[in-house]
Image (tube, rainbow, N blue to C red):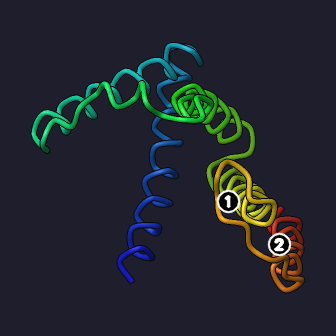
């Protein structure tokens, strides 16, 4: 149950962040806004790291495979694409499409066992669920 509640909070925070970042982007520029998001995220992480035990940062040098370290780069593009989609589609429609994309890609990662994730078997009901979600977006549109 805890994971479910945390996921709900995550979704809510992502929607609110998207709206706020879009507002900052309209008043500055896309990359200034995205840079600000990443900088403030980094500073927040430094503060939380400082007060939560200060794990050894050099452990990053031991991460394998090395492509696992590009999450921050992807994060910058996530911020960019969320802001652009919310600016053009509006928050609700953009969130629907973003969540559907997350579901489809996450399921593909599981089915194919990508990026070190444990492989799971394909289930038609999950594919049908994604198709129903796509139909829901079409109806919502």
Residue 83 is drawn in which quadrant?
Answer: top right
Depth check: give the residue in front, 110 or 12. 110
Residue at the spot 86% in from the left edge and 67% down from the top edge: 134
In the rendered image, the vertical position of residue 82 relative to residue 66, given as above or below:
below
Circle 2 residues within 10 Å: few <14, some 14–19, many ≥20: some
Q: Secondary structure at mark 1?
A: helix
Depth check: give the residue in front, 99 or 21. 99
- Left or right relative to 86: residue 139: right
Total marks shown come to: 2
Is residue 2 in sight in this rendering?
Answer: yes
Residue at the spot 44% in from the left edge and 59% down from the top edge: 10
Residue 56 placed where, x, y %? 23, 32
Depth check: give the residue in front, 36 or 55. 55
Query: Which mark identifies residue 99?
Result: 1
Residue 138 placed where, x, y %? 88, 65
- Which residue is under mark 2? 130
- Left or right relative to 56: residue 91: right
In the rendered image, the vertical position of residue 72 relative to residue 113, given as above or below:
above
Is residue 22 in sight in this rendering?
Answer: no
Depth check: give the residue in front, 81 or 69. 69
- Left or right relative to 8: residue 50: left
Residue at the spot 51% in from the left edge and 29% down from the top edge: 72
Q: Quadrant of the C terminus?
A: bottom right
Check whether the beta carbons of the residues at disc 1 and disc 2 lie within 8 A of each other. Answer: no
Residue 86 placed where, x, y %? 65, 41
In the rendered image, the vertical position of residue 80 relative to residue 119, given as above or below:
above
Q: Secondary structure at mark 2?
A: helix
Residue at the spot 84% in from the left edge and 86% down from the top edge: 125
């Amino acid at each position: 149950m805890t994971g479910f509640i945390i996921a709900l909070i995550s979704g809510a925070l992502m929607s609110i962040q998207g709206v706020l970042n879009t507002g900052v982007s309209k008043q500055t520029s896309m990359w200034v806004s995205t840079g600000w998001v990443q900088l403030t995220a980094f500073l927040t992480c430094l503060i939380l790291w400082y007060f939560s035990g200060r794990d050894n940062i050099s452990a990053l040098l031991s991460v394998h495979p090395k492509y696992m370290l590009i999450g921050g780069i992807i994060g910058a593009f996530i911020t960019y694409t969320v802001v652009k989609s919310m600016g053009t589609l509006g928050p609700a429609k953009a969130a629907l499409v973003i969540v559907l994309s997350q579901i489809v890609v996450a399921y593909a990662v599981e089915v194919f066992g990508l990026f070190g994730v444990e492989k799971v078997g394909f289930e038609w009901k999950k594919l049908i669920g994604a198709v129903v979600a796509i139909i829901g977006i079409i109806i919502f549109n």
